[in-house]
Image: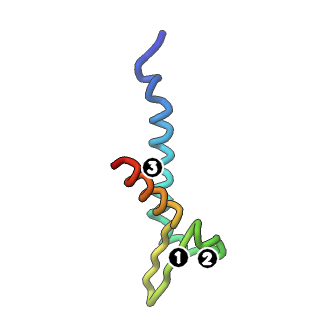
């Protein structure tokens, strides 16, 4: 028996993956404070900015992919 919901299974899996990645990226600034070894990760994968108790962590690859998707959809 074929169900219409089976068509959406791949999108559901991608959605869960995106939620997990989003939670990880939200947690990166906290993790960079707790785990100082994150600074050894190459800068193009993870960039950590520290100044006067302020921590900012981002992924340049993620920013580039976001920009590409914005320009591609216009």
Name the spot of residue 8 as percent of width and height, x first: 44, 28
Task: Estimate how packed mark 1 is, as few (under 14), some (14 to 19) or many (20 or more) residues with alpha carbons within 10 Å.
Answer: some
Q: Where residue 39 appears, x then y in whole percent?
A: 61, 76
Identity of the residue drawn at 56% across and 75% down: 34
Q: Which residue is mark 2?
A: 39
Classify 10 Å Cα crowding around label 2: few (below 14), some (14-19), many (20 and above).
few
Task: Give the residue pinned by disc 1.
Answer: 48
Q: Single out the residue that lies furthest toward the bottom.
A: 52
Task: Check contact, mark 3 vs mark 1: CB within 8 A.
Answer: no
Corner quadrant of residue 38:
bottom right
- Name the mark nearer the viewer: 3 or 1: 1
Q: Which residue is mark 3?
A: 19
How many labels sit on residues?
Answer: 3
Q: Quadrant of residue 40?
A: bottom right
Q: Is residue 69 above or below residue 36?
A: above
Image spot of residue 64 (x, y percent): 48, 61
Q: Residue at left 58%, top 66%?
A: 45
Upstream in sequence: badge 3 or badge 2: 3
In the rendered structure, which disc, 2 or 1, sits on the residue that comes first in sequence? 2
Above or below for 59 versus 74: below
Position of 34 relative to 45 (above/below):
below
For label 1, the SS is strand
| Extreme residue in the top direction | 1
């Amino acid at each position: 028996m074929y169900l219409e919901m089976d068509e959406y299974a791949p999108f559901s899996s991608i959605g869960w993956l995106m939620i997990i990645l989003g939670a990880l990226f939200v947690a990166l600034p906290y993790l960079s404070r707790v785990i100082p070894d994150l600074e050894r990760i190459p800068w193009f994968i993870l960039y950590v900015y520290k100044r006067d108790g302020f921590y900012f962590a981002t992924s340049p690859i993620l920013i580039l992919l976001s920009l590409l998707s914005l320009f591609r959809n216009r």
